[in-house]
Amino acid sequence: MPVPEFDIADRMRKALRHAGISVQQMAEYLDVDRSTVSTWINGRISPSTQTVRLWALRTGVPFTWMCHGTMEPCDLRPPASGSNDVSAASHGHRINNMHSFLFGLAS
């Protein structure tokens, strides 16, 4: 009997549950509509790599697990131009702050 595979939407839901964070709280953290978070956790739209990184940081789960369910390194490509993923534009300030924090310390 085959074992079901869990996709990124499944892992996003599990991470929320693990951290005790609601969909609304995550939407506020990412500065997106609640409906956008719902599209990600229901698998209708794939989130950007930046979204997955922020999701992992907020929920306290490893980014590599969020990507593919293991601890192996991730290789998520950014969404193609014209994608329906609005996360990069709507929470770019958080992404820039994260990069400043992570990479600005080495300067």
Image (tube, rainbow, N blue to C red):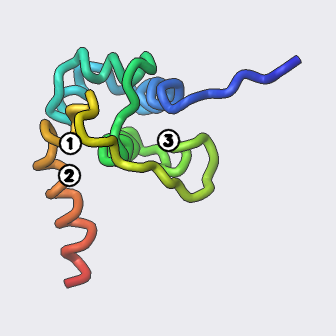
Q: Earlier in the sequence, mark 3 or mark 1?
A: 3
- Residue 79 x %, y %: 33, 42
Instruction: Check disc 2 and give the amino acid type.
Output: Ile
Proximity of marks 1 and 2: CB atoms separated by less than 8 Å: yes
Q: Relative to 1, is 94 above or below? A: below
Q: Relative to 105, is 100 above or below? A: above
- Residue 39 x %, y %: 34, 18
Instruction: Check disc 1 and give the amino acid type.
Output: Ala
Proximity of marks 3 and 1: CB atoms separated by less than 8 Å: no
Q: Relative to 48, is 75 above or below? A: below
How much space separates mark 1 and mark 2, taking CA atoms?
A: 8 Å
- Residue 20 x %, y %: 39, 26
Residue behind mark 2: 95
**Front disc: 3 or 1:** 1
The residue shown at (25%, 41%) is 81
Side (left or right) of 57 relative to 27: right
Residue behind mark 3: 66
Residue behind mark 1: 88
